Structures are given as C-alpha cells and as structure tokens.
Image (cartoon, grey):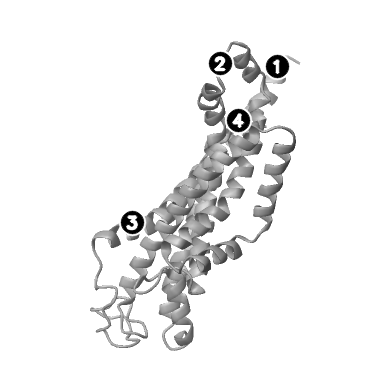
Amino acid sequence: MTSIEPATTAPAMKRAGAGTERRTARRSSTLITGCVLAGSIALLALVALFWLPYATDDTSGGRLTGPDGDHLLGTDKLGRDLLTQVMNGATIAFRAGLGSVLIAGTLGLVLGVLAAFAQGWLDDTLSGFLDILIAFPTLLLAMLVVAARSGTLGSAVLAIGLAQSAVVARLVRILVKRVLAQDYITAARTSGTSWGRIVAGHVLPNIWPTLAVNLALQFGLAVLAEAGLSYLGLGAPPPNASWGRLLLEAQATFTTAPIGALAPGILLVVLVIGVNLVADGLRDTLDPTTRERPA
C-alpha cells in the first residue's frame, strides 16, 4: 500500500499543477488581448489629440474618393478625410467613456455607501429608487437628459453617467453590506474605530476589485451609448466626428463606399471587445472569489 500511494498521488499533483498553469495562462492571455485591442484604439485617440492628417472641417478632398496616397481611407460624402474623422471619433469615444465612468463611479460610490448604512424605511426607499433607475432604459434616460439640455458631448456624457450611476450604486450597496456583516468590522467598532476609518481602511479596499471590473464594463457600455446618441443626432455636434455620427452619414452610401461605415464600425467593435476582455482579465486577477480552485 505504501508503495502504491506515491505512484498514484504524483500524477494527480502534476495534473492539478498543469491545470492551474493553464488557467493562469488563460487569464493572462485574456487580459493581454484586451489591453492590446483597447490600447491600440487608445493610442489612436492619443495621437489624434496632437496630430490629425487634415482639419475636421476640411472638405477639399472630393466626394467619396477611394483610398490613395493623400487619403489613406478615402473621403466621405462631404469630401472630408475619413482617417481624420475616424481618429477624431476615437478621441470622442474615450472622452465619453472616461467621463461617464467618472460620473457614474463617483455618484454611484457615494449613493451606494449611504444606502448600505441606511436602515429601515430609508434603506427601502433608496433601494426602490435605484431599482427604478436601473429598470429605466439607459439610452432612453440619456436621450431625455440630452434633449432637455442640448445635443453636445458634455450633455451626452452627463446623461450616460447619471444613467449608469444607479447600476454602480446598487452594486456598491450590496458589496458594502456584505463587508459590514463581517466579524472584523464588529471588532473594529467595538475597539472604537470611527465609521469613516472603517470605510477607508476596510470597506473600500475590499470592494474595489469588483468595482473596478464593473466600471470597466460600464466604460464599454458608455462608448456604445454615446455612439447610439450620436447616431440619433443627440451626441457631439459637427464638425466633431463621433463614430455613431459617421455610421449615420455613411449608411446612405454603404453600397458605393462601404469603408465609410466599416472603419468606424470595426473600431467601435474592437474597442468594446477589448474593454470587455480587460474587465474579464481584471475579474480573474483581482477578485479571488472568481478564481477556480485546483483539483
């Protein structure tokens, strides 16, 4: 018996180790792939801040010309350089995504923490209010806010951020209540630690991995929402070239000049997929509750 056990245990240990290595490699590859996809669009947006091939309102290129040495992606129906429009659209996408996430994260964190500490009817009221906002379609709420103010990028960012803040607040409320139920929180309160120090020293460090993943997902949703608003004419006004507006302008000429719709559409898909892969990679890396245990 003693001579058989090591022989049967060693292969099992090797298989478990190999399985752990495969899972680690898969997590790393997901995060790396997402960083490459999203990072390439981020680099394009960064370059567009300092350099563009042409001015965004330059219409001297001729209507619907194909790709050539002067216009690498050709021109649109107004004679504008399509590469310039796509690069400018990348900048707008990141401004919309980052701005919306900043608003949603800040407001959602404050409301979520307050709701987690609320008791009785106040807790029920805040929870019901958040549920109503979440049930209300994000794009429709954003359209109402934009229509009430004006069709600008700032209005779109504010609208999307407000709509997403309810989702963030509800997640924060759940996470904070889970942390507050732990024994070490009771011990900290018994020792006289203030609620402010408990939130800063215990609550926030424990919820930030899950919150970071959610905010990464909200970034992708915000980019899609901004493109949808621009497609409906409620986003950044001309000469700003949001990807959604480029898709709207190119749909009438898709059969004769498909690159006008394919270029912004592909970049939009690449950015959203990249951000989602980054979120998945962050979840597997930062959140220990989602990690698979070795066999």
| Among the two numbered marks 1 and 3 on one chain, the one whose residue lies closer to the N terminus | 1
Where does the image place residue 15, in percent across and percent down from the top left? 63, 33
| Disc 3, SS | helix
Camera-nearest label, 3 or 4: 3
Camera-nearest label, 2 or 4: 2
Gap in angstroms between the C-alphas marked 1 and 3: 60 Å
Q: What residue type is labelled 4?
A: Lys
Camera-nearest label, 1 or 3: 3
Which quadrant of the figure has residue 144?
A: bottom right
**Mark 1 Cα within 10 Å, few/some/many (few <14, many 20+)?**
few
Gap in angstroms between the C-alphas marked 4 and 1: 18 Å
Whether residue 194 is situated above or below residue 58 in the rendered picture: above
| Disc 2, SS | loop
Q: Which residue matches tag 1?
A: 3
| Among the two numbered marks 2 and 3 on one chain, the one whose residue lies closer to the N terminus | 3
Outermost residue toward the top?
A: 191
Camera-nearest label, 1 or 2: 2
Q: Which residue matches tag 3?
A: 43
| Among the two numbered marks 2 and 4 on one chain, the one whose residue lies closer to the N terminus | 4
Camera-nearest label, 2 or 3: 2
| Among the two numbered marks 1 and 2 on one chain, the one whose residue lies closer to the N terminus | 1
Where does the image place residue 204, in percent across and percent down from the top left? 53, 31
Point 46% across, 65% down: residue = 268
Q: Which residue matches tag 2?
A: 193
Q: Which amino acid does label 2 sit on?
A: Thr
Q: Are marks 2 and 3 in contact (CB under 8 Å)?
A: no
